[in-house]
Amino acid sequence: MHPETPEVLAYLELKIAESQFTSTPDQLAADKRAQVELLAKRQFLLEQKILASQEAQQVYLPDATLDEAFARIQNRYETPELFAQALSNSDLTPAGFKAALSQEMRIDAVLESISAQIEPVTRDAAEIYYYNHLERFQLPERRQASHLLITLDDDKPEADQRVYRKLCGLQEKIQQKPARFDKLVLRYSECPTAMNAGNLGLITPGILYEALDKALFTMQPGEVSTPLRSPMGYHLLRCDALHPATRQSFAEVSARIIELLTERQKSRLQKEWILSL
């Protein structure tokens, strides 16, 4: 076994544990740790095939590029000592980590060179995809909304009633003179949005708390709700504008479709090449 192999395996275990379990290998239960180790060994063998390929011999990774990538990762830690300690917890040294990182970057470069051989995605292909998947470009109904929030300091019923009555009073003032809403928001709202007239932006269904969401999507532009309860407190919600459900045009999404199809072609070509090794 090459002297660098154990640390390359440790590096792969670290990457897999983070992606599969959002954890580090040393924090995993024995069964999950064994699963990570098995996946790392399979990945290691595959990577050795890639690095032994003729295509890999054409790839050159400048030291400066590797040093820059290593420094970016190390700089996420307050000191080099803390970085080294974090690596040590996963059976890695800075030198071993750098060697494993170099191998990963070389493999990425090989796969990128393979995928560079794809034919460019045409506008016609993108348009065919668009019309075959129209449902993916449907935008739901959206509404522009603002609110006035008064929070609850505790769970006592009298506090709840006091805030509710206060919001009812503010609602009456707004009904008498709708233009008062912005001034009342600035004066009474306890949400940071108060500095921007309570603006919540463009809302799609399911974004707000349930009671607010249900109310908003039954309101008309300019309408102000009755006091609505949420875990934060009580709200007065105003519907500012209504944007009906619509479908994005091909012109709006063509670049995104071409990017998607290009990435799919790259992935397919890379997988085919790997299977041929």
Image (cartoon, rainbow, N blue to C red):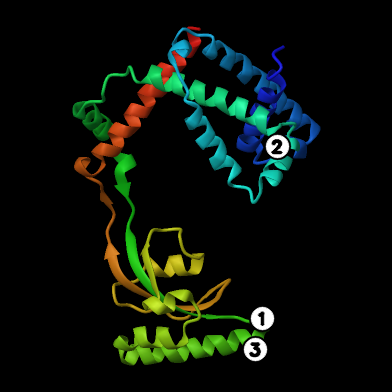
For residue 184, which quarter of the picture? bottom left
233 displayed left or right of 273: right
Q: Position of residue 123 (x, y in %)?
A: 20, 29
Decide: is 193 above or below 48: below
61 displayed left or right of 39: left
Residue 237 visible somewhere in the drawing:
no
Residue at 71%, 41% in the rendered image: 86
Type of residue at label 1? Asp
Q: Position of residue 187 (x, y in %)?
A: 43, 88
Decide: is 112 above or below 56: below
Identify the element where label 3 is drawn: helix
Question: Circle 1 is placed at which residue position?
Answer: 154
For residue 261, which quarter of the picture? top left
Type of residue at label 2? Leu
Numbered mark located on residue 87 in the image: 2
The crowding category of the residue bearing disc 2, from other C-alpha atoms within 10 Å (few below 14, some 14 to 19, many at least 20), is some
- Between tags 3 and 2, which lies in front? 2
Q: Position of residue 94 (x, y in %)?
A: 67, 33
Q: Position of residue 47 (x, y in %)?
A: 57, 17
- Between tags 1 and 2, which lies in front? 2
Pick the front one: 173 or 107: 107
* Measured Cα–Cα span from mark 1 to mark 3: 10 Å
Pick the front one: 186 or 58: 58
Question: Circle 3 is placed at which residue position?
Answer: 158
Residue 128 visible somewhere in the drawing:
yes
Residue at 68%, 20% in the rendered image: 4
The answer to which of marks 3 and 2 sits earlier in the sequence is 2
Decide: is 205 above or below 105: below
Numbered mark located on residue 81 in the image: none
